[in-house]
Each structure stands twice: as C-alpha cells, then as structure tokens.
Image (cartoon, rainbow, N blue to C red):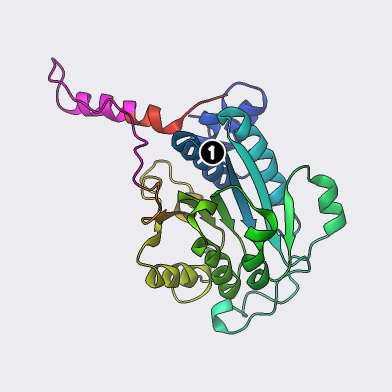
Amino acid sequence: MLPPRALTLARKLGLVDLREMVEHGGGDRPAYAYCVYHAALLARWLGYEAISVIEFGVAGGNGLVALERLAAEISSATAVEIQVYGFDTGHGLPAPRDYRDLPYHWKQGFFEMDKHQLEQRLDRARLVLGDIEQTAGTFFSAHRPAPIGAVMHDFDLYSSTVAGLSMFDVDERYRLPRVYCYFDDIIGSEVELYNDFTGERLAIEEFNSAHDDKKLSKAYHLITRYPMRTWYHQIYVLHDFSHSRYNDFVSGDDQQLPLGPTTGWAARAAHALGAWTRSVGPGT
C-alpha cells in the first residue's frame, strides 16, 4: 500500500476510494477520518439514521474545518447523516489549575480563536462556545444532537478533559453503544512528558475508575498493525456496557468454518479476510 502522503494524492486524483484512504491512514487528519468513518459504519449497522461527531478544543479551527469536510464525504459514502460540533472557550486555554493541567507546558490564552474568520470557513458545523463545565451541561437540551459516535479530544488540560468526558454520563439516547475517541495530548515529546498521573491520561484513568458500566479502552486492533502509525496509540473506544444496544449483533452472519481441502493457516487467513471485508464497509 502507498505511504500516507502518496495515498492522499491518489485519493484526490480518484485512484483510491474512501475506504482505502481511511484504512491505510491517508488524508491530513487520518485519526479523525478513522473515528468518523467507523462510527458511521456502526450507526448504519445498528439502524441509526444520524450521528454527531465532536471536536473538543477547536483553537484556530483547522481541525474543525477538516472534520466538517470528512463528515460530508463519509456521510455521502455511508448514507448516515453526520452532525458536527466544535467546543471551545473562544478565547484560548483557561488558566491551568494545578500540576495536573501541566502548567509547565500550557499557558492561559494559548490557541485563541478568530471566531468571525472561522465561521466564514464553516458550512454546517456548529460552534459551542464557553466554559466546558457549563456547556457540557446545557449542550443536549440546547442542541438536541443526534447520538454521539466520535469525539476528538484536544482540550489539552486535565480539568477540561474531565468536564468533556462527563458528557458520556447523559441519557444513552445521546450516544452510540461504542464511541470512537481520539486523544491528542497523550504522547508528546521530552518537553510535555505526558504520563498517567496528569493531563488527558489521568482524566481517562479516573473516568474508568469511576464507572463500572462504561470504560475507555485502547483500540488494540490498531496497535498491532504494520507499519505502525503514532495515532494508532491515540485511539480509544468508549464501551457503554449498559447501553440497550450494546449487545446488538453487528458481525457477519457467515461464521462457519466447514471442513475442506484447505486447512491450517490458509483457512484461517480466508476467514480473517472475510471478517475484514465486513468490518471496513463501503468504498466510494
């Protein structure tokens, strides 16, 4: 398969379909594309007509513009309506509260938004501006969104991420039974030194500890792929075990392995290929 940059060019030239681009990491926001695409597939398998996708932390707006474009393309391919929402203060990062917000790396006012300029670039995406501790509580009554299928977490701070994750505690009608999540600030470099006791990683750990029926888990099927991409380690899936649709069957109906002339690794490979074909969904 082509490397990501060549794959992106091939997609623009119409030489590869959407499915191939998503599965092999093409595009300028491959993690966004992966989450939205597979959320739309899950919604279609479960019979949902529409989903919402969210970016927490819009900043200048490049990510939200890309998310809106991807949502339109994926919606067309999957026949699932995709609503796009971007959460932000509108005036940059709030002040870090304590060591958990990594004040050695983040400062109040980083990533200020030019709201007027961004709104001119957006088509259907909606901005939800204000302190996330307030907007998380009013969002559902104010917007009545379709069930959340994917969330791009880029709030940077531990405290803001905790508030964003609280939105998974509302009534199940506002989310799919499994929600694809991308966490931007969990790897970093020798400067950030992200760890399990601060920032987004701590917010994930505390969310899991506080919930018996909901867990954020790494996407283990991704981190076994070759060649490895950094963003594979940044994908988590919210598993809502008590959701009324969690146990609905979405796999292929043909799971039999009849005895035939070919056995061993070849038979297992054929079975795996069939399962993969089912999982990746349509191309366009």
Tell me which amino acid carries mark 1. Tyr
- Above or below for 249 versus 102: above
Side of 146 where 222 appears, left or right: left
Residue 191 showing in the rendered view = no
Q: Is residue 76 magenta?
A: no
Residue name at image x 45 percent, y 38 percent: 46
Residue name at image x 22 percent, y 29 percent: 268
- Above or below for 192 versus 65: below
* Image quadrant assignment for residue 256: top left
Crowding at dot 1, Cα within 10 Å, few <14 / some 14-19 / many 20+, comes out as many
Side of 212 where 97 appears, left or right: right
Q: Position of residue 128 (x, y in %)?
A: 72, 59
Side of 96 where 192 appears, left or right: left
Rendered-image quadrant of the C terminus:
top right
* Image quadrant assignment for residue 132: bottom right
Q: Position of residue 10 (x, y in %)?
A: 61, 26
* Helix, strand or loop for disc 1: helix
Q: Where is residue 238 in the image (x, y as percent from the top left)?
A: 44, 55
Q: Is the magenta stretch mostly helix, strand or loop?
A: loop
Start and end of the magenta stretch?
A: 247-274
Q: Position of residue 120 (x, y in %)?
A: 85, 47
Residue name at image x 56 percent, y 25 percent: 17
Residue 207 showing in the rendered view = yes
Q: Name the residue under label 1.
A: 37
